[in-house]
Image: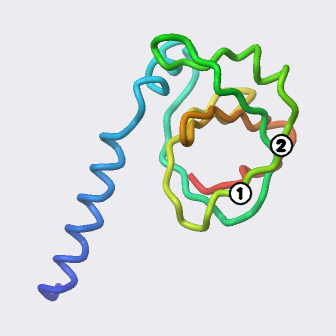
Amino acid sequence: MKKSELKQKIKECLKEMKLNEKISKGLENFKKDNDKSEIYTAYGLGDSFDVRWTDKTFSDGVPHTKYFTRNREKSIKIPMGEKFHILETDSYWYFERDGTWYAVDRNEYGTPPFDY
């Protein structure tokens, strides 16, 4: 392996480590509330998709899930290749961006609207 390739690989690993360190406390606490859930790193595909959303959270950062159903569904777009963390449960994929929580109903999509 060339020195330049090795440097690039190290940079990629460091970026991934930094991203993994940035898992929000809210997401970690939300996982504790959902026994059969897992946190994954996801990547945007640049496509629009429908989500439920809320900006209401408890003091530990966990979203008030009742507001997902009270708020209207809206369409969002995550830029191609943008990294973010998701919480995968049996029914939904949850994620937080810029202080807003989103829930994607797994029954509405044959495959997720992002890669993970």
The image position of residue 19, as x and y in percent, is 35, 49
10 Å crowding of disc 2: few (<14), some (14-19), many (20+) = few
The image position of residue 63, as x and y in percent, is 61, 20
Mark 1–mark 2 contact, CB under 8 Å?
Answer: no
Q: Nearer the viewer, residue 7 or 97?
A: 97
Kindly state the secondary structure of the residue where label 2 is placed: strand
Position above or below: 115 against 88: below
- Amino acid type of the residue that numbered disc 1 sits on in the rendered structure: Lys
The image position of residue 53, as x and y in percent, is 73, 32
Residue placed under numbered mark 2 in the picture: 74
Q: Residue at x 87, y 32 (%)?
A: 72
Kindly state the secondary structure of the residue where label 1 is placed: strand
- Amino acid type of the residue that numbered disc 2 sits on in the rendered structure: Lys
Position above or below: 80 against 49: below
Residue 51 shown left or right of residue 24 in the figure: right
Q: Residue at x 81, y 49 (%)?
A: 75
Residue 43 shown left or right of residue 47 in the figure: left
10 Å crowding of disc 1: few (<14), some (14-19), many (20+) = few
Q: Residue at x 24, y 76 (%)?
A: 8
Position above or below: 11 against 27: below
Specify the label residue 11 is tagged with.
none
- Locate the N terminus by quadrant: bottom left
Residue 102 shown left or right of residue 10 in the figure: right
Specify the label residue 77 is tagged with.
1
Q: Residue at x 76, y 14 (%)?
A: 66
Structural distance between the alpha carbons of marks 1 and 2: 10 Å
Task: State which quadrant residue 51 falls in.
Answer: top right
